[in-house]
Image (spheres, grey):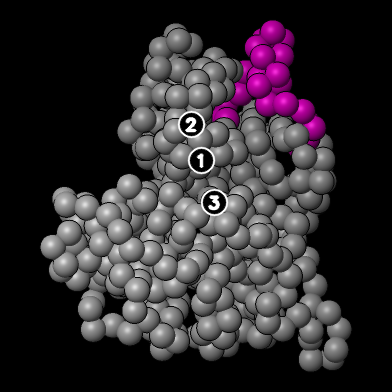
Amino acid sequence: MKTIRLRPGKERSLLRRHPWIFESAIAKGGGDSGETVRVESADGQFLAWAAFSPQSRIRARVWSFDERQRIEAPFFVAACERSIAARARFDIESDGVRLVHGESDGLPGLIVDRYGDGDDAVLVAQFTSAGTERWKDVLADALLQATGARHLYERSDASVRQLEGLEPATGWLRGGTAADGAPVPVERSLREHGWRLTLNIAEGHKTGFYLDQRDSRQRFFSTVRRLGSQRVLNCFCYTGGFSVAALAGGAGHVTSIDSSGPALERARAHVALNGFDASRATFLDADVNASLRQFLKEGRTFDAIVLDPPKFAPTAAHADRAARAYKDINRLALQLLEPGGVLFTFSCSGGISADLFHKIVASAGADAGVDGYIQERLAGAPDHPMTLEFPEGEYLKGLSVMRKG
């Protein structure tokens, strides 16, 4: 068994059970890509078993802090079973569920979503670390065994794989052919809070859909209904999940903006799929910042606004530039918001903490000359858990802000 030994004092984070070991913390030792290594303190005391990644700044990711644990196939089977069993304790109003959430479930670098129930279920997995790549086949079999599903589609095309020295990989990893010999469709349907949605597991963002915003879409629906919001603006709308929520909540008209034509076509289809009058929805294939500025020039205002932009800061190194971008769009949105109106604003950037995001939105309000109440702090749905020892798991953070007046 290969070993890595840490520099003096660098064991502290591991003693707090944080699962990452950075390159700068290692004094000597190493291993092959994804190989399990023994992690020791500077004085030779056992700390953890971890997967080594020779090209990543995160040089090792912890599998277990138990010296007696053997990192073999049964370990991964048990870890998958624990993670999936935990979801049964969550109150999830959807047949789209995050089954494994990386470090938070003890499987760093593994993301698994399930779309559908029973025989129709399809698993979609992302293997984003050297360790999960090395154990991919074992993990794939363990996931099918734990869920009873027969089909697993791989979406290992996230840019983070490049940091691990891994090439993109997509396609059916298990199954892919139905009992009658027909190909299993990559177009899938989804139920969420009584709404009907669709996705493409081969081409959609992430694993096909933003399951992490499930609870926030429900909260937005409730807010629109409670306040009687008539004019709603959904920025970076993707396939229109928040737009459907607003229409279901009784919004008179929803304007949805995105720069992806195919995403907007699916959003438009979702309006029809849920039986809403098409005249209540407008879709703009446009730049959000330019659109917000144009709305200001036209004197338009809205009763409820959603800002759910893409990742501006993948790491803390990009935080300053991202903070300026977040501040600018939030300033514009707050200026467009009617007094008494509500802004749901989000950041999915790992390099932006919840506290920093709060400060950014507060600064945007000051620049806009707008005061507001924070109604609620928003986060990922409960099947995207954050653990006590791994605060980095809180990549999605948001605020519900009501404009005073």
Q: Residue drawn at (68%, 72%), measured in percent from left and top?
A: 153
Alpha carbon separation for disc pair 1 and 3: 12 Å
Alpha carbon separation for disc pair 2 and 3: 16 Å
Please name the amino acid that badge 3 sits on: Leu
Quarter occupied by the N terminus: bottom left
Alpha carbon separation for disc pair 2 and 1: 7 Å
Label annotation for residue 243? none
Residue contact between numbered discs 2 and 1, judged by CB atoms under 8 Å: yes
Residue assigned mark 2 = 318
Please name the amino acid that badge 1 sits on: Pro
Label annotation for residue 314? 1
Q: Residue drawn at (84%, 91%), measured in percent from left and top?
A: 180
**Farthest-out residue, front:** 28
Q: Is residue 307 visible?
A: yes
Residue assigned mark 3 = 163
Disc 3, SS: helix
* Image x and y of residue 270, in percent: 75, 52
Q: Is residue 116 visible?
A: no
159, 134: nearer the viewer: 134
Disc 1, SS: loop
Tell me if residue 357 comes above or below residue 247 in the rendering.
above
82, 37: nearer the viewer: 37
Tell me if residue 292 comes above or below residue 6 in the rendering.
above
